[in-house]
Amino acid sequence: MNQENQVLKQRREKAEALADLGVNIFSNSFKPANRIKELLPKGEHLAEETFDETRFTYSIAGRIMSMRKFGKAAFCHLMDSSGKIQIYLKKDVTGDEQFAAFKKWDIGDIVGIEGKLFKTQTGELSVMADKLVMITKSLRPLPEKWHGLTNVETRYRQRYVDLIVTPESRAIFRKRVEIIRLIREFLGNRGFMEVETPMMQPIPGGATAKPFKTYHNALGMDLYLRIAPELYLKRLLVGGFERVFEINRNFRNEGLSTRHNPEFTMLEFYQAYATYHDMMDITEELISWLSQEVNDTMEIDYQGTTVDLTPPWSRMTMNQALVKIGHIDPEIVNDNDKILALAKATKGVKLEPLAGSGKARTALFELLVEEKLINPTFITSYPIEVSPLARRNEEDPTVTDRFELFITGREIANAFSELSDPIDQRQRLEQQIAEKGDDDEIHAEMDEDFVRALEYGMPSAAGQGIGIDRLIMLLTNSPSIRDVILFPHMKPETETEEKKEKGQAGQCGKCKE
């Protein structure tokens, strides 16, 4: 029998022994009156080896994280969601019956304790236990305390164990909850209304990505998990809701990487009578404010690189970035034939057969510029070829009033002044469908209802999508998207060999994840 099986056998034997003593090892009768964090300030005035003068009895529950037994006495550390505290058990205080049951306790058990506060001779605040209750017997051991859960894949698969033993993981997910709460507060204070739009759609629109497909029996039709909420949020602009936002899940049946999960969280918000310049201003304000709120600074460390989020942020057109950062001759950048020829001749650039100069510029930008944009940088004037839902620039109709925000070489946000002309929109969608051809990886179908909505009249507007997971990666100094998603998607546990993860995000209207 290997060591793991031996430990599991011993745990089950202890559970059986407790049952023989009449102990319910999965009870539901103990209700703690206190949280551990409530007790910690109460011991500040206590001197060493003294009891709380009030002699008040506290009632707490939590998981045993460490244990030292000394015959007729023992020390444990008990942890709940608010903190950790030491428990002192003495046989002559608990009584023979309770102490006998305690002898069958293990690290990892969830227990209830009642007792009084005191400080040990080493000055550690502790609870002198006089009542012990087994709430849940742990039948599996926690990872060895000095090493914790060191296997990264196990951390992702068994997040429940990771959260027990890794304080850093607990801190990341608490910060995630706080960031999302603050985003709602920020937008709510500016008059935005939170809405919910369909997550199953008859036509997956708002992005170019491979969707997940399902079938609805009662309706007798195919449905798709949404790749973006954009087209539904724009319908709400048509309906008269002038400031709307949604924080919810998008789904893309594509690759896995440190930046991509097939199920991810997006923020999209739209504002009537605004432009993409307004979106840049609000984005600067939102992200810098979030950093100050959750990190107490706008200058953060990300994987060893200092990033300054203090506004104002750099702004440049895609052509300017190709010249300044990509080091391409301006004569080539400004010539459609030359930039297309350069892209076709550049190793690492893949273009569709019908791709024009706009897609060539974008591909070269992604290859030569993106990863060099460390501090926040807005890249504007995206070619119309890669921006089918964005408004044409009035001075240069070959580009759109669009930006993407890059931080640490990653796209964090995508925004543009919205296209409200239904005739132009139909033509662009038809062109997009034609370019897909026979590619069955990408669902290409005209959304007639969306075009019809635009024909009723949509106010001038701007909208934006922000990848929540990537933003949280940035603000928590997390190297992988799996570090900020509680239960990331993984290959089946039965597979013995890791295949190399690869894949790209879909090209998006607002949320190129």
Image (spheres, rainbow, N blue to C red):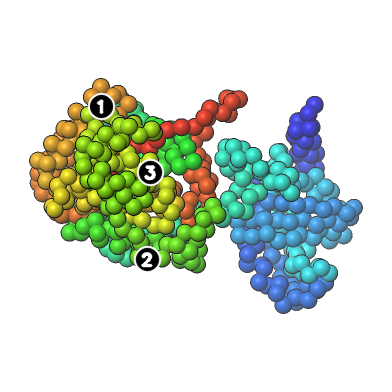
Which of the pair 325/350 is nearer the observer?
A: 325
Q: Which residue is mark 3?
A: 368
- Is disc 1 in contact with disc 3, using a CB cutoff of under 8 Å? no
Amino acid type shown at disc 3: Leu
The percent coordinates of residue 445 (x first, y second) are 21, 30
Q: Which residue is mark 2?
A: 311
Amino acid type shown at disc 1: Pro
Marks 3 and 2, how far apart at CA? 25 Å
Q: Residue at x 85, y 52 (%)?
A: 69
Q: Which residue is mark 1?
A: 353
Residue 48 shown left or right of residue 259 in the figure: right
Q: Residues within 10 Å of mark 1 (few under 14, many from 20)?
A: few
Marks 1 and 3, how far apart at CA? 21 Å
Q: Tag 2, which secondary structure?
A: loop
- Is disc 2 in contact with disc 1, using a CB cutoff of under 8 Å? no
**Taking 265 as reference, is 38 above or below it?**
below
The percent coordinates of residue 90 (x first, y second) are 84, 59
